[in-house]
Image: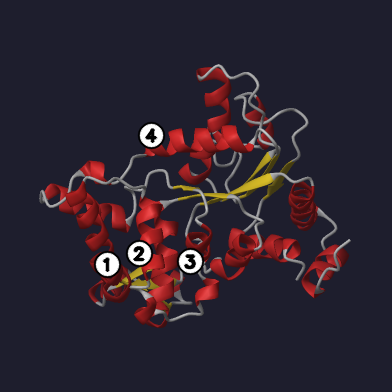
Amino acid sequence: MVNKGEVSQFMRKHFRHFNAASVLDAAKGYEEQLNQGNKMMITLAGAMSTAELGISLAEMIRQDKVHMISCTGANLEEDIMNLVAHTHYRRIPEYRDLTPQKERELLDRGLNRVTDTCIPEEEAFRRLQTHIFDLWKKANESGKRLFPHQFMYRMLLSGVLEQYYEIDPKNSWMLAAAEKNLPMVVPGWEDSTMGNIFASYCIKNELKPSTVKSGIEYMMCLADWYTEQSKNSGIGFFQIGGGIAGDFPICVVPMLTQDMERAETPFWSYFCQISDSTTSYGSYSGAVPNEKITWGKLDADTPKFIIESDATIVAPLVFAYLLNY
């Protein structure tokens, strides 16, 4: 057995019951999947990039402990925004006490708040806009079409953003993913700042909507990836938060088995969800894993874990365990 570091040893000693035990069980289950030679998809919802999850996730990518990522358009771009504008961010610890007028003052200063953290519009959004537009424009003029993450990969790998780096680049999960050319799906990319900006250029007839590939094409790409990868290994599903980042990719299995009538398609080989969503009110984000059995996503004996906690606390601990910290 690989020697574990102090963080992992602390977890083994203290994380014995309730949510703490679930964290350790899920980490051990993830590790067992890797030991069996299985692949793992990680899904990112919420504001994980603004929470700087890249500090641990980037190393997970570099060490081949992540094989596919599904994320929201916000997480796709906000990791890069943090990379190029970190010193301009503002933390507001007293955010619960802000009046509407104080919130308006933040807007007037170009500070867009995500809980206790304000993203600087000029240094983050507009800095990316200039360079990503150049890539969109060239693709538009040549008739070439790419996925949203592929445009981001090209921008990162071109080196055009290096002049702005304000954190250690090893802490950017998007840069790590670009360097690995990690497979990715970004469902609902239109619901993001860059997606909105792209739409504005289309409305002004400066770009064609078809220049950026769609969510349907992402599903087709995911179906091909899952079919190929599952020939020789299981594929696990590690879901951080709820929403479309998780809902979209997990459906690839029932789509292949039921709609494509490929009965030999295996279920996901592992499932873990970190969420504080309530199992009630018809909330899919809060649905227990067993409900997914009825939809043909998981099997009765699939290892399943629920961690009902704050993903910004829990996910780095799981990753630390897997990285032997």
Q: Give the residue at mark 3.
A: 175
Compared to residue 270, the image places residue 174 above or below, namely: below
- Point out the tag, 1 or 2, that comes first from the N-terminus: 1
Query: In what quadrant of the picture does the N terminus appear?
Result: bottom right
Task: Tell me where residue 27 sits by quadrant.
Answer: bottom right
Q: Give the residue at mark 4.
A: 216
- Point out the tag, 2 or 3, that comes first from the N-terminus: 2
What SS does tag 1 mark? helix
Q: Nearer the viewer, residue 178 or 79?
A: 178
Query: In what quadrant of the picture does the C terminus appear?
Result: bottom right
Q: Position of residue 298 (x, y in %)?
A: 67, 31
Q: Can you see residue 98?
A: no
Neighbour class for label 2 at 10 Å: few (<14), some, many (≥20)? some
Are discs 1 and 2 less than 8 Å apart at CB? yes
Question: Nearer the observer, disc 4 or disc 1?
Answer: 1
Neighbour class for label 1 at 10 Å: few (<14), some, many (≥20)? some
Q: CA distance from mark 2 to mark 3?
A: 10 Å
Compared to residue 206, the image places residue 293 above or below, namely: above
Task: Tell me where residue 210 sits by quadrant.
Answer: top left
> What kind of residue is marked 1?
His
> What kind of residue is marked 2?
Met
What SS does tag 3 mark? helix
Compared to residue 139, the image places residue 84 above or below, namely: below
Task: Tell me where residue 99 sits by quadrant.
Answer: bottom left
- Point out the tag, 4 or 1, that comes first from the N-terminus: 1
- Point out the tag, 3 or 4, that comes first from the N-terminus: 3
Q: Position of residue 34 (x, y in %)?
A: 74, 50
Q: Give the residue at mark 2.
A: 155
Q: Give the residue at mark 1.
A: 131
Q: CA distance from mark 1 to mark 3?
A: 16 Å
- Point out the tag, 1 or 3, that comes first from the N-terminus: 1
> What kind of residue is marked 3?
Leu
